[in-house]
Each structure stands twice: as C-alpha cells, then as structure tokens.
Image (cartoon, grey):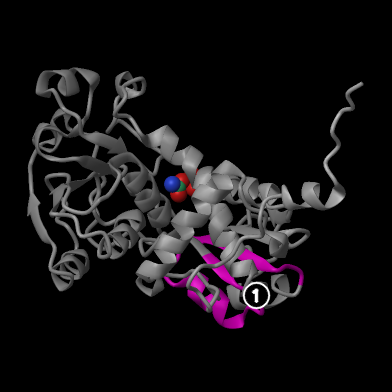
C-alpha cells in the first residue's frame, strides 16, 4: 500500500517566498523627490526588487497593512492607478481623493489650505504619500512638512523620478543593457519625464543620446548641461526616420506638453499638430527596416501611430506592465524606512 506524502509543516513553511532583502543597502529611501538623489545602487536594487515582485519570488512584510495616500492635484491615469495597483499588490491600502485640487478638497485654491498643511495632516493619517502637482517643487515643499516619506509623482515641468525609474527598468529589460547603445529622446524635451530620465541615464553609459525635438523647441540648457557633466555624447536630428535608422531605443515624450504645468513655461508655443516628420508609423518602420525599440511614458498624442502597436519593437504597453513592479519596489523601499 502506498500513502500520499504530506510535507512536514517545517518544509512547507520553507517553501514560502523569502522575505525581501535590501542587498548591499543599509539606508532605505526617505523621500523620492528627484532623480538627482537616486544613486546607481538604488537603481540596481529597485530593478532587482521589481524583477522579484514580477516573479512573486519574495514577500514584503514591511508593506502589509500600511496606508498609502495618493494626492493628485493634477490629472493622471498611469501614476495614480499604477501606485494604487502596486499598493494593493503589496497588501497595503490606498487612500486619496480623485481631485485634490478640486472643490472636494480643502487644498482647493478657493479655501486655500496650503500644501504644507495638507502634507502635515495627511502624513498623520498615512505611512507614505504620492504627490502629483502642477507646481515645480510642490513634492519637496510637502516633504518638508511630512512625517512620512513623500514620492514625487510629477511636479510641473520639473521632475517625474519614478517614471524615469520605470523607463530605465523597461529599457534595461528590452535591450539587455543600455551600456554602449544609442538612446533617442523624441517629443518635447522640456517635460519632467525627460529631465528625470537624463539624470538616471548617467549610470547607464549609453554611447550617445540623440534628441529629435520639435523644430521650434530647443533642448533646455539644464538638460544639456546634465548630459555634458556626465560626459555622454549627444546630437540633434531633425526627423524621426533618422532616429529609426540610427538608434537602439527611442524614448518618446508627448509632442505637446502644454498641459503639464502651470503657468506654462515662458515663451511656450503649443504646436498645432505633430509634423509628419516627427510621427512614427508602421510604414516608416518597415521602410527603414528599423529595429529601434519604442518606449513612451504615455499618454501619447499623434507621435506614435496606433499602426505600430502590434509590432515586436513597440514596448510602450509592456513598459506600463513593468511599471507596477517598479512602483511596488519604490513603495517597499520607502515603507522600509519607517
Ligand atoms: N506617464 C504618466 O505620468 O502618465 P499619467 O500622467 O497618466 O500619470
């Protein structure tokens, strides 16, 4: 007679995922306000953790039961729902209001509760906060009054550091390594995603950065200075076919960024429409025989035609899927700080 084997309790316990360890790190992230304060160990650690969350090979007990406040003073789909989805996956809870800048919130302009007071209050009701605001420096101002870690989910024209972490993670996954590759940046180069991405590219040692900006919008001086400081070569090209011919990966930004921050940057001229020379289509990809991997933080406007969506080089929706694991990693790191 044979009997079914039942694993002893001790063995079954060992089969549960290991508790996540912060390899080589002793200092959890207090706030995530700018890509400038993220170092290469942080990036490596967060990418490793994101991989582990994807394969569910770890558990993160520090996050279970914690409360994440989502404070969105500006519209968002990916950042808000991405952090909410990551929160749920970690066994934590999300609180927040659909429209912090709207009439349901005391931080609405008419009732004039300052964002500092808002941070002081919400930080006493939560374990971490994610902030999206139209003003440069808003997340930093709130962090100064917060008792819990603050994550910048995009502040005006300034920065969007977690999007840059997602962008780097997705490009590392797509390319294997960014080292020695030619990375293009298309669309409006003044946006917050570009400013944060340039900072994180300093660790990746690409061979060059190729800009393909709208004809009437120069790349901001501070972005070029950051590249020069890190001794990465850059050049400008005038049409997207050149990018599709020359580059290993393209990170597109929306062509029209007029909605991103108020007041609009001085001298901003909103484009009427994206010129054909800057629109990627499946036809152009076929004509150039391009193998350039296409990324985009989204939302897209006209700059990547839907005809590209089914191509093997279209990575932008995969980038969204990966974003959840990176946001879990970021939340885990800040929650471990408490
Ligand atoms: N990429 C990004 O920040 O998208 P949302 O504005 O929808 O959050």
Say if 254 sits above or below 43 in the image: above
Q: Which residues are magenta?
A: 125-151
Whether the residue carrying mark 1 lies under 8 Å from ligand 1 is answered with: no
For disc 1, the marked residue is 148
Residue 291 appears in which quarter of the rendering?
A: top left
Q: Residue at x 40, y 69 (%)?
A: 41
Task: Give the number of marks.
Answer: 1
- The quadrant the C terminus occupies is bottom right
Residue 149 image offset from top left, x and y in percent: 60, 72
Residue 156 appears in which quarter of the rendering?
A: bottom left
Q: Nearer the viewer, residue 245 or 145?
A: 245
Tell me if residue 305 can be seen: yes
Q: Residue at x 22, y 28 (%)?
A: 280
Q: Residue at x 63, y 45 (%)?
A: 85
Residue 97 image offset from top left, x and y in percent: 69, 54
Whether residue 186 is in magenta: the answer is no
Q: Residue at x 76, y 69 (%)?
A: 125
Residue 232 image offset from top left, x and y in percent: 13, 63
Residue 169 image offset from top left, x and y in percent: 39, 50
Q: Nearer the viewer, residue 74 or 80?
A: 80
Residue 245 appears in which quarter of the rendering?
A: top left
| Residue lying at the far bottom of the rendered structure | 144
- The quadrant the N terminus occupies is top right
Q: Nearer the viewer, residue 68 or 120?
A: 68
| Residue lying at the far right of the rendered structure | 1
């Amino acid at each position: 007679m044979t009997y079914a084997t039942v694993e002893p309790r001790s063995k079954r316990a060992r089969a549960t995922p290991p508790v996540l360890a912060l390899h080589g790190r002793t200092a959890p992230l207090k706030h995530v306000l700018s890509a400038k304060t993220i170092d290469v160990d942080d990036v490596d650690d967060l990418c490793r953790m994101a991989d582990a969350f994807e394969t569910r090979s770890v558990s993160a007990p520090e996050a279970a039961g914690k409360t994440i406040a989502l404070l969105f003073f500006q519209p968002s789909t990916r950042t808000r729902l991405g952090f909410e989805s990551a929160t749920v996956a970690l066994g934590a809870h999300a609180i927040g209001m659909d429209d912090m800048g709207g009439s349901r919130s005391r931080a609405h302009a008419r009732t004039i509760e300052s964002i500092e007071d808002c941070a002081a209050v919400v930080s006493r009701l939560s374990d971490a906060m994610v902030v999206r605001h139209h003003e440069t420096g808003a997340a930093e101002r709130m962090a100064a009054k917060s008792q819990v870690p603050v994550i910048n989910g995009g502040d005006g024209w300034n920065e969007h550091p977690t999007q840059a972490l997602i962008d780097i993670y997705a490009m590392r996954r797509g390319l294997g390594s960014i080292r020695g590759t030619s990375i293009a940046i298309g669309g409006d180069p003044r946006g917050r995603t570009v400013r944060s991405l340039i900072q994180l590219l300093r660790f990746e040692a690409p061979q060059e950065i190729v800009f393909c900006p709208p004809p009437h919008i120069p790349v901001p001086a501070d972005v070029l200075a950051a590249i020069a400081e890190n001794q990465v070569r850059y050049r400008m090209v005038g049409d997207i076919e050149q990018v599709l011919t020359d580059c290993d990966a393209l990170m597109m930004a929306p062509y029209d960024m007029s909605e991103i921050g108020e007041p609009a940057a001085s001298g901003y001229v909103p484009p009427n429409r994206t010129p054909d020379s800057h629109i990627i289509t499946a036809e152009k990809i076929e004509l150039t025989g391009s193998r350039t991997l296409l990324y985009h933080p989204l939302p897209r406007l006209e700059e990547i035609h839907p005809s590209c969506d089914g191509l093997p080089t279209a990575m932008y929706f995969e980038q969204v899927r990966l974003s959840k694991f990176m946001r879990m990693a970021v939340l885990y790191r800040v929650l471990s700080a408490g």
